[in-house]
Image (cartoon, rainbow, N blue to C red):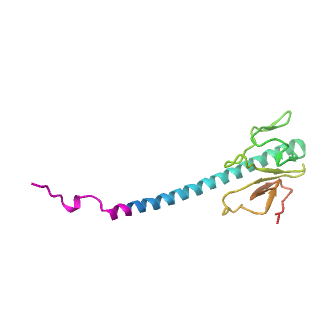
């Protein structure tokens, strides 16, 4: 004698499985997109914080020396990014920060001693601080912080 299983107990139909897979794929796509956006925003926030910390460090240097360190190839006083910035008597910053996404694509510093400009390249072009047309050391940048006495002009 054969056991008859009611139709409602046989399992899922192909249409139900495909629909479920499509819904899961859609949710995964939305989730990965949001994750990527949050990563970009976090890196941009880190860039802004790094430049803010550098600006405070430069103001401390200015208070001690009555001038900002002179720029050398986009670096602060010739010090490489990722190294300590100090004088004989004072350590101003233990490690000059590097870009969070690409350590080879560094921040840029301009100064003749009377002013400074710090540049970074933001990823999120919807950020309210994102600006185009600024160059430093031959590279394009989209965000900057300056000393109180200076404002850079965009390059065409």
Q: Position of residue 56 (x, y in %)?
A: 78, 47
Quadrant assignment for the N terminus: bottom left
Residue at the location (32% across, 62% down)?
14
Quadrant assignment for the C terminus: bottom right
Horizontal side, residue 25 vs residue 43: left or right = left
**7 vs 101: above or below:** below
Observer-nearest of 33 and 43: 33
Residue at the location (88% across, 46% down)?
70
Q: Quadrant of residue 152?
A: bottom right
Magenta stretch: give its range.
Answer: 1-19
Horizontal side, residue 2 vs residue 25: left or right = left
Confirm whether the magenta stretch covers residue 65.
no
Q: Position of residue 151 (x, y in %)?
A: 84, 59
Q: Residue furthest front?
A: 1
Q: Position of residue 53 (x, y in %)?
A: 74, 47
Q: Residue furthest top?
A: 89
Horizontal side, residue 66 vs residue 12: left or right = right
Q: Position of residue 144 (x, y in %)?
A: 77, 56
Observer-nearest of 38 and 16: 16
Q: Quadrant of residue 83?
A: top right
Confirm whether the magenta stretch covers residue 2.
yes
């Amino acid at each position: 004698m054969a056991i008859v299983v009611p139709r409602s107990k046989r399992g899922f139909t192909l249409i139900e499985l495909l629909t479920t897979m499509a819904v899961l794929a859609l949710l995964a796509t939305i989730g990965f997109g949001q994750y990527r956006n949050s990563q970009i925003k976090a890196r941009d926030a880190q860039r802004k914080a790094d430049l803010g910390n550098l600006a405070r460090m430069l103001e401390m240097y200015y208070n001690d020396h009555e001038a900002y360190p002179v720029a050398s190839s986009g670096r602060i006083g010739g010090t490489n990014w990722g190294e300590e910035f100090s004088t004989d008597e004072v350590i101003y910053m233990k490690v000059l920060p590097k870009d969070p996404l690409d350590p080879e694509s560094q921040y840029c510093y301009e100064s003749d001693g009377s002013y400074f400009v710090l540049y970074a390249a933001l990823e999120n072009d919807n950020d309210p601080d994102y600006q185009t047309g600024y160059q430093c050391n031959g590279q394009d940048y989209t965000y900057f912080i300056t000393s109180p006495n200076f404002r850079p002009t965009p390059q065409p």
